[in-house]
Image (cartoon, coloured by chain):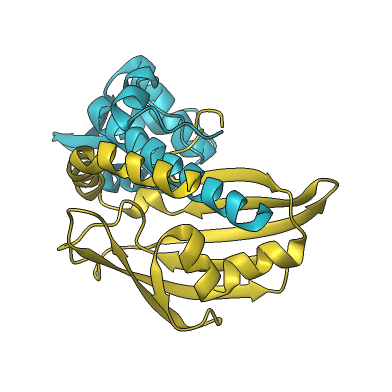
Chain colours: A yellow, B cyan
Amino acid sequence: MGLHKTTDSIEKHIVLRAPRLRVWHALTNTEEFSAWFGIKLEGAFVPGATVHGQITRPGHQIVTIEMAIEQMDPESRMSYRWHPYPFESGVDYSTEPTTLVEFQLEEVAEGTQLTVVESGFDRIPLARRAEALRMNDAGWAEELKNIARHVES
Amino acid sequence: MLSHSTGWREVSRAAPVFAALGDETRLALVARLSSEGPLSITRLTAGSAVTRQAITKHLDVLATAGLVSDLRRGRERIWELEPRQMEVARTYLEHVSKRWDEALGRLKKFVED
């Protein structure tokens, strides 16, 4: 990915060698989402619903995540709001602004092109962003090892 | 697209001093404060098609994000860039971006297997 032209949003593109319906299920079925995202979600993704989940990071406390589902347009578009990465324990996010995550699916010759846009970072207090970086620094190396283990197993 | 070997410190070091902002007016404001240094609201508005009120709103958005700050000199507000804050903002975004790369890498494996 190139350098970001904005401090407010992130845009990602990835081509997945899988049918659009397969990708749609991976994104919208809570069990499947849980499996690849590395989270334990409860409930179903339905527009207007709030889905709760937990991430257990080794050596860290359990971190609770809340996803407010907004739009679900079958095999095409899904969006939700949450408090963005990196998730931390012991932080009360409830009064802070959320970011909007939008998944967009498009059929291409090789399979499915997925676009992810997360926006609204400029509304997150800068002090919070700085603190998130500071807190995450220590756990970073360990985290990388976990991810490597997961994708290689 | 996926790189698991670099931490945000490396990303931070490699990154330019400040990011361009997505909104054109705010980008222009940041560019001017960057090249000309602290400027009054009058100077920032002069020659612009955008109203003083709109410029003030944009500056307030940038200030809320901690990217610029103002000080009052007499009856004027003088605005200046907070380069260190800009760096935090873009480093944070690079970090979030990396986490998405990793998550999407796991998704790829999940749906292609």
Q: Depth check: give the residue in front, B21 or B17.
A: B17
Q: Depth check: give the residue in front, B110 or A27.
A: B110
Q: Depth check: give the residue in front, A4 or B82.
A: A4
Residue A138 drawn above or below residue A50 = above
Image quadrant where residue A66 sits: bottom left
Residue shown at the point (48%, 64%) measured from the top left = A35
Image quadrant where residue B15 sits: top left
Asked whether residue A143 is in view, the answer is yes
Residue B89 point in image, percent of width and height = 32, 37
> Which residue is the extreme one toward the front?
A153
Residue A122 point in image, percent of width and height = 37, 48
Residue A133 drawn above or below residue A79 = above
Residue shown at the point (61%, 66%) measured from the top left = A26
Residue A23 drawn above or below residue A6 = below
> Which residue is the extreme one toward the top?
B35
Asked whether residue A76 is in view, the answer is no
Image quadrant where residue A1 sits: top right
Residue A111 drawn above or below residue A55 = above
Residue B37 point in image, percent of width and height = 29, 18
